[in-house]
Image (cartoon, grey):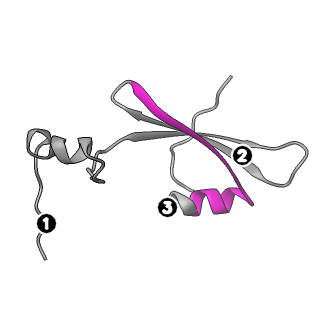
Amino acid sequence: MSKTVNNYQEIGILIDSGKPMVFTCHPEARVTVRQLSNKDTIKATITISISDTCVGIVETEYASIKDLLDAFQIDDLAEIWEVLD
C-alpha cells in the first residue's frame, strides 16, 4: 500500500478545518539522566530539538538504567555519555 504525500499549500485548508494530519521529521533528543536520591528510580529529562529550537521537554522515570537504555535501544557499552558539571 503506498501513501500519498502533499505539501502544505495542498492541504493547509484541511488543517485549518480541523482535519488531523501527520508529517515525519528527524529531531534530536538530548537525555539528561540522574538517580533520584530518595527513590530507586532513574529520572530522565528528554529535551527534543529541531535544529537549534527546543520543541519539547519531557520528564519521566525509569525503574533502572537498564530500562532507560532499553527504551532508547542503546547498548550499555556505547560511548555516548558526557559528564555534566
Q: Secondary structure at mark 1?
A: loop
Tell me where residue 12 appears, x and y as whole percent. Answer: 17, 41
At 13% from the left and 66% from the top, the residue drawn is 3
Badge 2 or badge 3: first in the primary sequence: 2
In the image, 68: left or right of 16? right
Viewer-side label of 3, 1: 1
Tell me where residue 16 appears, x and y as whole percent. Answer: 25, 41
The stretch in magenta equals: 53-70
In the image, 5: left or right of 18? left
Q: Secondary structure at mark 2?
A: strand
Q: Which residue is mark 3?
A: 73
Viewer-side label of 1, 2: 1
Q: Is residue 58 magenta?
A: yes
Q: Secondary structure at mark 3?
A: loop
Q: Residues within 10 Å of mark 3 (few under 14, many from 20)?
A: few
Q: Which residue is mark 2?
A: 43
| Amino acid under disc 2 | Lys
At 12% from the left and 55% from the top, the residue drawn is 5
Single out the residue that lies furthest toward the front.
17
Q: Which mark is residue 3?
A: 1
Tell me where residue 1 appears, x and y as whole percent. Answer: 13, 77
| Amino acid under disc 1 | Lys
In the image, 47: left or right of 43? left
Q: Nearer the viewer, residue 40 or 25?
A: 25
